[in-house]
Image: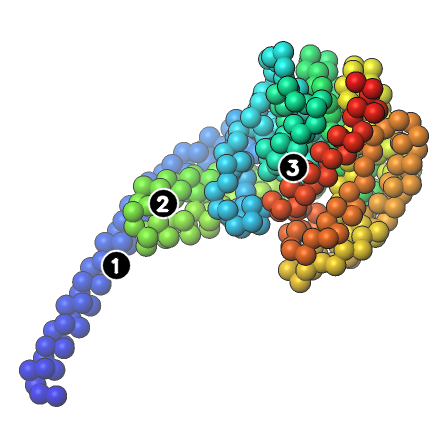
Amino acid sequence: MNRNTIKKIVVVITVNTVVLLTLLIIFDLLFRAMGTQIDKAAVAVQSESKKSVSFPNRLLNPYIGWIETPGTILKERLSQSRINLQSENDPDPDWLYITRNSLGFVSKFDIPLTKNENDYVIAVMGGSVAMWFVLQTSKEFIIQLNQHRFFKEKNIILFNLASGGYKQPQQLNLLNFILINSFVPDMVINIDGFNEAALAYANLKSGISPAYPSHSHWTHLTKGFALSGEIRKILGKHQRALVKMKQFSGLAQKFSFSSILSFIFLKQQERWKNEMTHQEILYIEKSETIAKDTRKLTIKGPNFSTDLNDIATIWQWSSKLMHDICTANQIRYFHILQPTPHDPDSIRQFTKEELKRIGSSDHLWAQGVRLIYPMLKAKAEELKDWGVLYKDLNTVFLTSTESIYYDICHFNQEGNEIVARAIASYIKENLISHYQD
């Protein structure tokens, strides 16, 4: 290689190095400028948050424990990894953009609901599994029901009144609340079981009444207006992360024409979303400690002994009372026991992926399910004797060879569609004969 060739190579390397360094400096300046603006906005929001006394994502409710903040969208509360698991890798499903209504439930409908003559309103109650059932399978479920002559001329409205962490008697209380506010659905579907076993058991182990809302979802809201400096800092960090997440989300959309820039911005968005989740966990832990110290009666409930049988009885009588209230108001009531991987009666062979995700049988919630699910099923026999239309979905996934569960209790889009067909089938089989329409 002669001297001129070497010289040319050196020149090319030097020029490219200079260009690369220039681009890096430009990018660095760009991010510094954006960071300054983001920090200014975050500081402003953080300053405002000091005037606030409640965590922005959940509000105390005097009748049902808590509600999610009305007006917020579901996307603000979910990480991209959770979205992918729930939707089976659809990164942007339609349900992400549904707004929480005035009652704090993720729903396309609000209360009061103006009904047309041929509208048929089905209210779904329960925890997060019931909520995902509505969000992911409304179309499939309605198609299945419309196959029956009873629903042929009806416009079915599937109304979500379920929320993550809810357990009996929250559904019972909510039913009473909507009725006294003149919202009378035509049918109520109560999908429950896991929370009634797992979360009630967790309450019991923490010395809290199993009849009270889940302590990990609720106790931090009972702290009153006394916020410690530590909690204020957590709130401020959460607000700063929220501002940054929204900023980078906007930048990712604005620079969508550039694969590199959009990738960088999306990564930053996910980073700040994870930071929000981290601060939420810290907030709940710290606030719960304060609540336990200062609001013992509020969060622990009445001071009388309870055991596992009481948990099952609370579930049983809550459902019976829902049935009685519905019957008295000409509302059709169906009670569905949700499937769960830790049900001791389950004989399904899980996939390797599911076994990694459903968690250890030593988990506190899994212990609750193993101990209490058989008791719920025994109590269900009396429910049937009392006229409750009850369906155990324990075997609904028995023939499924694909992964359905993606954590200790939730299932993906395919799982929800299987559940939708099973519930629709049960309703069609029992509706006419039971109600003699």
- Report which residue position mark 3 lands on: 133
Between 172 and 304, the one nearer to me in the picture? 172
Q: CA distance from mark 3 to mark 2?
A: 31 Å
Q: Secondary structure at mark 1?
A: helix
Category of crowding for the residue at label 1, using alpha-carbon neighbours closer than 10 angstroms: few (below 14), some (14–19), many (at least 20): few
Looking at marks 1 and 2 on the same chain, the residue that comes earlier in the sequence is marked by: 1
Given residues 350 and 183, the one toward you in this image is 350
- Please, which residue is most extreme toward the left here? 4
Quarter of the picture holding the C terminus: top right
Residue at 67% over, 29% down: 147
Q: Nearer the viewer, residue 107 or 136?
A: 136
Looking at the rendered structure, the kind of residue marked 2 is Ala
Mark 2 residue element: helix
Quadrant for residue 65, please give it: top right
Choose the circle earlier in sequence order: 3 or 2.
Answer: 3
For label 2, the residue is: 252
In the image, what residue type sits under mark 3? Answer: Phe
Q: Is residue 216 visible?
A: yes
Residue type at the position of mark 1? Leu
Is 97 displayed left or right of 365 in the figure? left
Residue 163 visible:
no
In the displayed structure, 254 sits above or below 388; it is below
Q: Is residue 222 left or right of residue 255?
A: right
Is 60 placed left or right of 208 in the picture?
left
Residue that badge 1 annotates: 24
Q: Position of residue 14 (x, y in %)?
A: 15, 71
Q: Using the image, determine if residue 221 lies above or below residue 258.
A: above
Of labels 3 and 2, the one closer to you:
3
- Tell me which residue sits at (79%, 14%) in the image: 329
